[in-house]
Amino acid sequence: MNLANPQLASVLADVRRGMIPAHVYGDPEIFALERDRLFARSWVFLAHESEIPDPGDYVVRRVLADSFIVARDESGAVRVMFNMCLHRGMQVCRAEMGNASHFRCPYHAWTYRNDGRLTGVPFHEEAYGGEDGFPRQDQSLLPAPSMDTHNGLIFISLDAGAPPLRDYLGDFAFYLDFYTRQSPAGIELRGPQRWRVKANWKIGAENFAGDSYHTPYTHASVVDIGLFREPKASKRKEGALYVAGPGAGTTYKLPPGGDFASQLRYVGYPDAMIAAMAASWSARQRALVTDSGFMVSAATLFPNLSLVHNWPQVDDAGTVAPFISLRQWQPVSERETEVLSWFAVDAAAPEEFKRNSYKAYLMCFGSSGMFEQDDVENWVSITEMASGSMARRLSLNSRMGLSSAGQPIKPPLATFAGPGVAYQGFGEFNQRHWLSQWSDHLERQ
Amino acid sequence: MKPAPVKPLPYTDPAHQVAHQFLVEEAALLDAADYSGWLDLLCADIRYLMPVRVTTARGAGFDSHPSMAHFDEDMYALRKRVQRLATGYAWTEDPPSRTRHFVTNVRTFSRANAEFLVESAVLLFRSRGDTREADLISAGRTDLLRETSAGLRLARREICVDEAVLRTQNLAIFL
């Protein structure tokens, strides 16, 4: 079931001029196109190497309906294998995490090593006449068509011809380091928390990409209770929004005049970690903090991996602790999304910092987080409204930051240290950037 | 927390009856959204924990995530959550959910130092708005109740939720 081409062309033309036909957030035909044209091609995040540190460790993750085993084999290599038995198609591994040298299908006991190779076929001689009837050699669970890693983040693409991951990440890799390479040790991921929300998957991805405009109102409650001082409108509109490669993100403006160490102390990092960051990040990355005076906050890597970095107060003594979260918006249907939300922390961070950072994460984001609670209420409501027939008559205005002639109402930041294009203040540049990539995918047969 | 002794107190034991009534009264406060009243039932050193459950092989030896929880709260964190719900900007609970905490399968175990270990099952029904299907959260709870001059108070709660993937939009509620 596909949209007729003229209809799709009209939807995409509207999207590209920043007027979003509301039904795209609740339309089964659009969802089918996303499955066939976007998720069948794009690089999609699955797991982080720290989740499977030892040989035999595995997690099971999905790309939409397709289940994959992400395992570290006996030689220490990361393998991503389609979780379907070669014989009758049973899901080979039905646990979501664990450690195993082999995976045995419960149906007829075909057995695979943790690198995917088929090693056991019961009654091979009697049933198949041995290698002649069924050559067991060289049989493996289907590997992911493309698999690659960056800073320990494991991505796959269902397209065997996908470009190298590093090429795909492009300029966004510069920003990814702020979240995933605070020291040479890299991050360790904990989780994920998993829960299902009755919301279209695009809404969260767009929100994290660049919606600094919602923060002062949607998240007014967390400012009110003194948990986090930055979301106030006065603070939020000083932040910069950037687009870079397939990603886009938001930042907060740091207090004026600080050097690298004092800015990171303001955000709550201990000196040992600041020294590691200074050594781990390039001069240009450090300049984003010092010369430009911005600290990364939420971001989205197209299509459905979002990141967040905030620094709330975690106790009555006034301790400010930053945290990092990665989250995936896993589409279930046009009206439902499984959220996978991980806590991430520099693996070399002091234990006390890890404790405070974990507490900060749990209070702010994830299934119980006080920020995230109010976001999801909005997104569920949008999805409900988008699923009726009146939504087909409404285009949502996503032109913030543009004049009627389509020109930015103010010039990009001339002195922004990071790659890509950045604007200070409110705007929907980032959401349009995300939607423009989405349009490109949906347009390609 | 140490494993529970094998035999719970008989239902006729007054200590069991007091513990059971504590849980029922607590559920009444939560369903009435009297969260400040609920905080008064907690010890200052409360630990309120809800691990993430995971699907693992029978022989794996664990079925909760070793390092991730939905809640891992002390009094500061719980007080912030309650303060937030009272701000007038906690949109996810405005309009509020209609909730019902069904508390059952209560087993009370005697402990030293004026403490009781109490296991219970809780089924939370949560209904929002007029078009959405209601959510159910089923969980087992292991509580440490402490005798104080003001009566029993909750010193620790571990919530063992029965789903690996929660089917509710958030945990803006307490279990």
Image (cartoon, coloured by chain):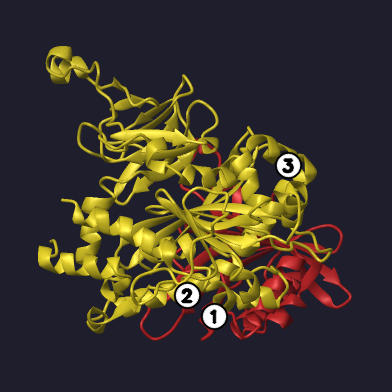
Residue at 32% over, 22% down: A117
Q: Earlier in the sequence, mark 3 or mark 2?
A: 3
Numbered disc 2: secondary structure: helix
**Amino acid beneath label 1:** Trp
Q: Is residue A186 above or below residue B7?
A: above
Which mark is drawn over residue A273? 3
Colour of chain A in the image: yellow
- CA gap between label 1 and label 2 equals 7 Å
Q: Mark 1 points at which residue?
A: B91
Chain of the residue under label 2: A
- What is the secondary structure assignment of the residue under circle 1? helix
Q: Where is residue A145 in the image (x, y as percent from the top left)?
A: 28, 34
Do discs 3 and 1 belong to a common subunit? no
Chain assigned red: B
Quarter of the view holding residue A430: bottom left
Query: Eyeballing the image, is A265 above or below B130?
Result: above
Residue B31 pos. (x, y %):
59, 82
Residue ID at (33%, 70%): A18
Task: Say which mark, if any, is on residue A377.
Answer: 2
